[in-house]
Image (cartoon, grey):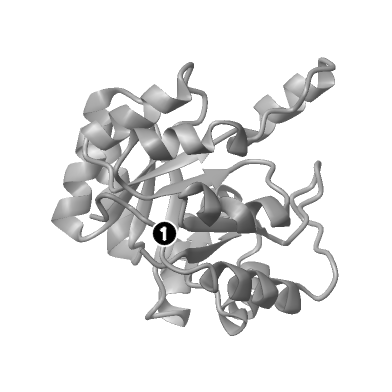
Amino acid sequence: MKPIVQVSLDLTDIKEAMEMAHTAVRAGVDWLEAGTPLILAEGLHGVKALRAEFPNHPIVADLKTMDGGYLEAEMMAKAGATHVVVMARSHPETIKCVVQAGKDFGAKVMGDNLGCPDMVQGARELEELGCDMVIHHIGYDERRGIAAAGHRMPNPLDQLREVVDAVSIPVQAVGGLSLEQAIACPSYGAPLVVIGAPLAIDADSFSRGAGNVEEVLRKICEAVHGFGDVAVKNER
């Protein structure tokens, strides 16, 4: 499949999120993500606003669903989300419910393996339960806690090839990647490249940008789109 650039709108103000989304679209970003901070702040209203403003762009709702899977996925799909996120550590029945809602309401399901004791096995189970894509995710708190204890901070690239090899669906890597590392994801076989916005996120505030964001995003899109097709066994 052709590599995709997704921008995560990790903002709590809808006006700022819309401004960043317009910047991203001008730069050539393919998918817009209502990041978890925006979901918490604006909920369905934020997704509806993005859909109204960008009728032709896929919109990912980063719900991180753990329970009540069918209803959450249904609500976001009806609000305009094309993709919803369910956690691997939720009960298998929850994942099945999200997958069913995705089928019923026309949304793709992204399964997130954050916090799995075995990240590779977590990815396999997400595919087995019907998810369309896997998010290989090292969490913010996990990274910070390990680093504070004096150990090397984990990075999604550490096991990315193993995750890609373990599943037949598209994979995305998330969590503490530098821009250069994010751009390199297609070379690992992971075609879904996500960039947090604002760029160069400050470790404590989720609110710091760096330089000319539109120009940086444009260069990222050119690099990722220029990579060429990424082999995916089963693009649902």
Look at the image and tell me whether residue 215 can be seen: yes
Q: Position of residue 18 (x, y in %)?
A: 60, 74
Residue shown at 56% from the left, 67% from the top? 224
SS at mark 1? loop
What's the residue type where badge 1 is placed?
Val
Q: Nearer the viewer, residue 46 or 214?
A: 214
Which residue does the numbered mark 1 point to in the structure image?
230
Q: Position of residue 146 (x, y in %)?
A: 74, 20
Residue shown at 39% from the left, 37% from the top? 165
In the image, 181: left or right of 188?
right
Residue 98 image-quadrant placement: top left
Q: Nearer the viewer, residue 119 or 165?
A: 165
Residue 106 image-quadrant placement: bottom left
In the image, 161: left or right of 73?
right
In the image, 165: left or right of 98?
right
In the image, 171: left or right of 149?
left
Look at the image and tell me whether residue 67 can be seen: no
Q: Position of residue 228 (x, y in %)?
A: 47, 69
Residue shown at 71% from the left, 78% from the top? 214
Q: Nearer the viewer, residue 185 or 23?
A: 185
